[in-house]
Image: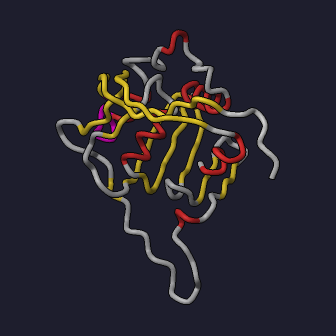
Amino acid sequence: QALLVERFGLKFHRDRSEQAIYAMVVRKNGPKMKESPKEEPPPSGEGGSSSKDKPPEMKIDANGGGTVRGGPSGNMKMKMQDGIMHMEMERVSMDRLAAILSQMMDRPVVNLTDLKGDFQVTLDLANSIALDAARRAGRPDDTGHADGEAPDPGGSTIFQSVQNLGLKLDARKSDIDQLIIDHVEKAPSEN
């Protein structure tokens, strides 16, 4: 942040405003996710670090699947088949899951589960939803959906997949912290 202020003349302020969100809450019968096993510390004398500190390694296979080793969600497996992307993440906090889901939705997802720790999470998403999320990540002005509507609301595989975890997404209004960019230069200043 300091580098952006120094090199690009970034000026910003923080604000809170009410906006539409999805509140991620625990369903009546409780969560259906397994808690992730505790991470083993690296053996002493090896100077190692936890898997969260290492850069992730990605491998893609010829069948449209792949694995990501390391990173904030631990090891993750993905497979695309019959129009569905199947994702298995071995170590996900509820805040991280809300951030992942926010990338695929028409509004932010806020974690209101009160669940602590990391969980093993499996999501089955329509390929079109995953592709829209990837497109939006590259072009934030393109939601991929007309008038910002939710991807396939009601019968969406996102909502179904979240329900399979023992959670649900409730449409609500809430005050959200926002970072407002007031000014930024297009080119950085000289070193």
* Residue occupying the point 67% across, 47% down: 6
Q: Residue lying furthest top in this view?
A: 147
Nearest to the observer: residue 9 or residue 32 = 9
Colour mapping used in the image = secondary structure
Question: What is the x, y in percent for residue 34?
Answer: 32, 54
Q: Please, is residue 49 above or below residue 126 in the view?
A: below
Instruction: Give the residue at the far left of this rendering.
Output: 28
Percent from the top left, x then y, of residue 5?
63, 44
Is residue 62 toward the left or the right of residue 84 in the image? right
Question: 175 or 95, which is in the foreground?
Answer: 175
Which region is colored magenta?
Answer: 163-169
Q: Does the magenta segment cover residue 166?
A: yes
Within the magenta stretch, is there residue 129? no
Residue 82 can be seen in this image: no
Q: Is residue 112 above or below residue 181?
A: below
Q: Is residue 88 left or right of residue 80?
A: left
Is any atom of residue 152 visible in this view?
A: yes
Q: Nearer the viewer, residue 73 or 110?
A: 110
Q: Residue at x 51, y 87 (%)?
A: 44
Q: Quadrant of residue 54?
A: bottom right
Q: Quadrant of residue 91?
A: bottom left
Return the x and y of residue 160 as percentages of the image width and height.
Answer: 37, 29
Looking at this view, is 93 or 32 the one in front? 93
